[in-house]
Image: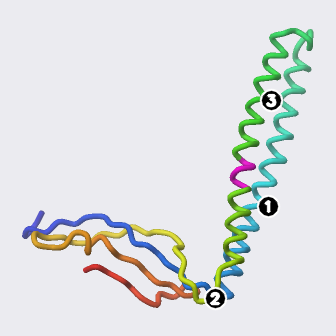
Amino acid sequence: MANGMLTIKRTITVRAVVTPRWKEEAERELSSAVSNSDGQLAQLEQEGQQLIDEIRRQSANPLDPRVQQQVIGVQEQVATKRAELEEQKRQLLEQQRQVRELAMEEVVEQGQLESFCQVAVGDNLVQKLQASLLVRDGVIEAIEDGL
């Protein structure tokens, strides 16, 4: 703490102006994420079935209750993971719907960045922590900084 100053980390909100280009990129990213989610679901089902087949193949008696318990365990794990992936996909589809409904020139929160700033005795901490960037098609239009 040199000269009564302190460096602190703060979060900067990145806000974007909705433009045709922004909408197109957002929809493309979300579509790609939905496709990826579909691929993960298909892979999960395939791997789960392969594991069950392997358990049954390695068993002398596939009807043995211990084998059945293993199979049930795998099926439960697959069902849990499937539910997580389906929820993730549902959220992505909802985000896609929301992006389509956005009006041009509307300002939306796009994410956050971290930065550092100097604070000193007498500074208004709330103001120092309030910082945001306004971006249009990747170009910074405004820096709203509480400094």
Would you say the magenta stretch is mainly helix, strand or loop?
A: helix
Residue at image coords 69%, 45%: 84
The part of the chain drawn in magenta is 85-89
**Residue at the spot of label 3:** 75
- Residue closest to the eye, 37 or 59: 37
Would residue 100 be found to the left or right of residue 62 on screen?
Answer: left
**Element under disc 3:** helix
Which amino acid type is marked by label 1? Ser
Q: Where does the image place residue 99, in percent across and percent down from the top left?
A: 67, 75
Label 2: how many residues lie within 10 Å, few (<14), some (14-19) or many (20+)?
few
- As drawn, the label of residue 35 is 1
Q: Position of residue 39 (x, y in %)?
A: 81, 53
Q: Residues within 10 Å of mark 1 (few under 14, many from 20)?
A: few
Q: Which mark is residue 104?
A: 2
**Which numbered disc, 1 or 2, marks the residue that appears first in the sequence?**
1
**Horizontally, is 120 left or right of 24 in the view?**
left
- Does dot 2 land on a helix, a strand or a loop? loop
Q: How packed is label 3: few (under 14 Cα within 10 Å), some, or many (20 or more)?
A: some
- Distance, label 2 to label 3, CA atoms, is 46 Å
Q: Is residue 120 left or right of residue 73?
A: left
Residue at x 39%, y 72% (from the top left corner): 12
104 w.r.t. 111: above or below: below
Position above or below: 38 against 111: above
Please state which amino acid type lies under the numbered disc 3: Gln
Inter-mark Cα distance, 1 to 2:
26 Å
Of the residues under marks 2 and 3, which one precedes in the sequence?
A: 3
State which mark lies toward you, 2 or 3: 2
